[in-house]
Amino acid sequence: MCLAIPAKVVEIKENMAKVDFGEGVLRDVNVTLVDIKLGDYVLVHAGYAIQVLDKESAEETLRLWKEILAQSEN
């Protein structure tokens, strides 16, 4: 099973971007597969941004992930 997580683009340098997964989790990802701009949300898998998402879809997915993680802590 493959898993991709949405993240917000906060910095772009050539073919790499720093993305924010929320709660201060920042990572560098390769963005050669997508056309992005600052503030976009991307779906990240294995260090690559594989798709640009609209803000509403990205935020809903992140909300659901937080809910799932909170349940697993109980």
Image (cartoon, helix red, strand yellow):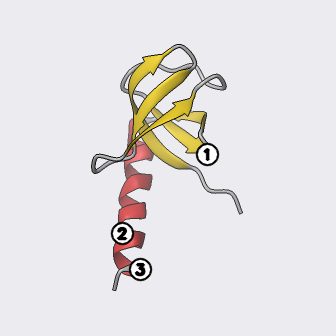
Residue 46 at x, y = what percent? 63, 45
- What is the C-alpha distance between the residues marked 3 and 2? 9 Å
Crowd band around label 3 with a 10 angstrom C-alpha radius: few (<14), some (14–19), many (20+) = few
Please name the residue shown 45% across and 35% down the image. 54
Residue 2 at x, y = what percent? 68, 57
Q: Which residue is mark 1?
A: 45
Crowd band around label 1 with a 10 angstrom C-alpha radius: few (<14), some (14–19), many (20+) = some
- State whether residue 3 is above or below residue 39: below
Tell me if 57 is positioned left or right of 22 in this view: right
Q: Which residue is mark 3?
A: 72
What amino acid type is highlighted by mark number 2? Glu
Please name the residue shown 60% across and 35% down the image. 51
Of marks 3 and 1, which one's residue comes earlier in the chain?
1
In-front residue for pair 21/64: 21
Q: Which residue is mark 2?
A: 67
What amino acid type is highlighted by mark number 1? His
Element assignment for label 3: helix
Element assignment for label 2: helix
- State whether residue 12 is above or below residue 63: above
Tell me if 28 is positioned left or right of 24 in this view: right
- What is the C-alpha distance between the residues marked 1 and 2? 20 Å
Residue 30 at x, y = what percent? 59, 29
